[in-house]
């Protein structure tokens, strides 16, 4: 039986056996089943209500081979759940007058712009992913010989402003890598050192730290496993503030109590914490997660079947994490596991909250819930011609959208052939997927782009993220390594103009 089918069966049984009171026995039985059936190596769960930890338990093994049982104090790599922690540090430095989050980021780093007339984005716009930066990540593995790229090297290549600030919310790891870089600059200490000296002790987060490189490896951290529960080596990336924090479930409960304003008065003023959970950039297209926007370090769903939800999750090879806050009910729920299984974390968190809040059914988390097929919006139909800029070269491309297919064609100047008189080779791709929401288009296809920094031993996918204004579309194409391991995603600029209307 496939693991996904087994997971669905376990969760259906769990839903059918929900009680009307706060009884977590049936949830524990399901978690034990997921571990016994090799769906998860371990899972740590924490629940905070009215300022008190009402449930905290760890299941399974942080190290399967060594048969080391996980505990509530075992650190797990948080992946993108690191971002609320990074945002909290920025807000504290802002409140202390060390950083002005309204200042442009160009005070700290140079910035390439697709359009030189773009305004400079502020630190605050980086916090809520509206700075116009793109999708980027680079992952490194201790058992491989790849030479890692530093953040400053990555910023020099991919620190590009693709949109006017405030136009669109585009989730950006390089943006949060920039925030940790700025923190290091203004404090004259590394991001890890600043957290360890000035933040974590004050929140009693004694099993939380930053892992920037293999020398920071800590044997306490839950060992990561792939989807078949094969062990993985130490993994790190160069956007430290975006995903390199490790924390235990007990520490996350301390962090949640700060953001529910249950404890740690004076660390951050109440209006600052509130602002992080309500701020919305005006006039911005928030296109991921239906009826959700990104505040200052948090996703925010103002009305989820009558309840406000403030949340963040993290996901990478070897880790899935989630922390959900219900500020009006003074509840927090967190789950951590050491394999990539976001479906389990999402569904278990939803089931747990139904035990805590009567007559409430949370909306399932779905990144593209607001999107529909391109067939539903004829304004996208037609032929769009333009260029993509890769390694300082303007490469001609054509995207054709109709009621049946989406074709992506370009001239590959990197593979010139004797058979074509050394002219660039035409490359044709039919997208695997395409969808639209308002003026946003997303799509995915297979194939390599003519990028000089790709790894030639890997296959590739590409992801399109475009935004329509009349007869033009602009945005990014992200080159993604398609392999058993998660390696990189690198953004390049696209500019298109409709050349043939949809009715021709």
Image (cartoon, rainbow, N blue to C red):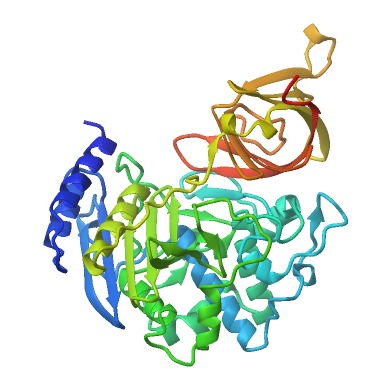
Q: Is residue 241 visible?
A: yes
Residue extending furthest toward the top: 419
Q: Residue 322 placed where, x, y %? A: 38, 60
- Quick one: 117 or 481, which is closer to the camera? 117
Residue at image position (74%, 68%) is 105
Residue extending furthest toward the right: 117
Residue 463 location, quadrant: top right
Residue 404 location, quadrant: top right
Residue at image position (59%, 32%) is 374
Residue at image position (30%, 58%) is 361
Residue extending furthest toward the bottom: 266
Tell me if 136 is positioned left or right of 42 in this view: right
In the displayed structure, would residue 129 be above or below residue 263? above
Disc count in the image? 0
Can you say which quadrant of the picture contains the N terminus?
top left
Q: Residue 479 placed where, x, y %? A: 63, 38
Tell me if 444 is positioned left or right of 13 in this view: right
Q: Residue 235 placed where, x, y %? A: 46, 52
- Quick one: 401 or 33, which is closer to the camera? 401
In the displayed structure, would residue 274 be above or below residue 245? below
Q: Residue 238 placed where, x, y %? A: 59, 57
- Quick one: 301 or 388, which is closer to the camera? 301
Can you say which quadrant of the picture contains the C terminus?
top right
Q: Is residue 341 visible?
A: no
Tell me if 152 is positioned left or right of 262 in this view: right
């Amino acid at each position: 039986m496939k693991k996904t089918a087994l997971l669905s069966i376990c969760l259906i049984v769990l839903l059918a056996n929900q009680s009307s009171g706060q009884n977590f026995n049936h949830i524990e039985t399901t978690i034990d089943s997921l571990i016994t059936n090799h769906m998860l190596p371990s899972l740590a769960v924490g629940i905070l209500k009215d300022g008190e930890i009402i449930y905290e338990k760890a299941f399974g093994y942080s190290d399967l081979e060594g048969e080391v049982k996980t505990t509530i104090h075992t650190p797990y790599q948080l992946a993108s759940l690191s971002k609320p922690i990074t945002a909290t540090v920025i807000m504290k430095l802002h409140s202390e007058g060390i950083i002005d989050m309204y200042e442009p980021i160009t005070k700290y780093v140079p910035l390439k712009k697709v359009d030189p007339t773009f305004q400079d984005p502020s630190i605050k716009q980086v916090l809520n992913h509206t700075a116009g930066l793109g999708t980027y990540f680079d992952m490194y593995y201790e058992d491989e010989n790849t030479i890692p790229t530093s953040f400053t090297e990555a910023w020099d290549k991919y620190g590009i402003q693709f949109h006017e600030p405030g136009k669109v919310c585009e989730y950006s790891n390089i943006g949060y890598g920039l925030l940790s870089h700025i923190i290091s600059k203004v404090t004259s200490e590394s991001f890890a050192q600043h957290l360890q000296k000035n933040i974590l002790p004050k929140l009693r987060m004694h099993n939380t730290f930053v892992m920037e490189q293999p020398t920071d490896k800590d044997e306490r951290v839950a060992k990561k496993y792939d989807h078949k529960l094969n062990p993985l080596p130490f993994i790190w990336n160069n956007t430290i503030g975006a995903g390199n924090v490790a924390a235990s479930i007990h520490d996350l409960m301390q962090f949640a109590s700060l953001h529910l304003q249950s404890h740690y008065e004076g660390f951050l003023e109440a209006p600052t914490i509130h602002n992080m959970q309500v701020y919305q950039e005006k006039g911005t297209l928030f296109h991921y997660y239906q009826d959700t926007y990104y505040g200052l370090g948090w996703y925010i769903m103002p009305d989820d079947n009558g309840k406000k939800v403030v949340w963040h999750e993290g996901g990478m090879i070897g880790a899935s994490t989630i922390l959900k806050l219900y500020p009006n009910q003074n509840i927090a729920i967190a789950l951590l596991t050491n394999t990539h299984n976001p479906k389990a974390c999402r569904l278990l968190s939803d089931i747990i909250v139904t035990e805590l809040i009567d007559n409430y059914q949370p909306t399932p988390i779905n990144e593209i819930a607001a999107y529909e097929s391109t067939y539903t919006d004829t304004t996208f139909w037609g032929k769009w011609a333009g260029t993509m800029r890769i390694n300082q070269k303007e490469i001609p491309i054509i995207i054709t959208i109709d009621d049946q297919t989406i074709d992506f064609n370009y001239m590959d100047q990197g593979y010139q052939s004797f058979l074509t008189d050394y002219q660039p080779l035409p490359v044709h791709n039919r997208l695997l997927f395409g969808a639209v929401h308002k003026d946003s288009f997303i799509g995915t296809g297979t194939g390599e782009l003519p990028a000089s920094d790709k790894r030639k031993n890997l296959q590739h996918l590409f992801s399109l993220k475009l935004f329509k204004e009349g007869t033009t579309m602009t945005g990014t194409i992200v080159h993604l390594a398609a392999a058993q391991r998660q390696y990189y995603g690198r953004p390049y600029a696209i500019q298109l103009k409709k050349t043939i209307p949809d009715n021709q």
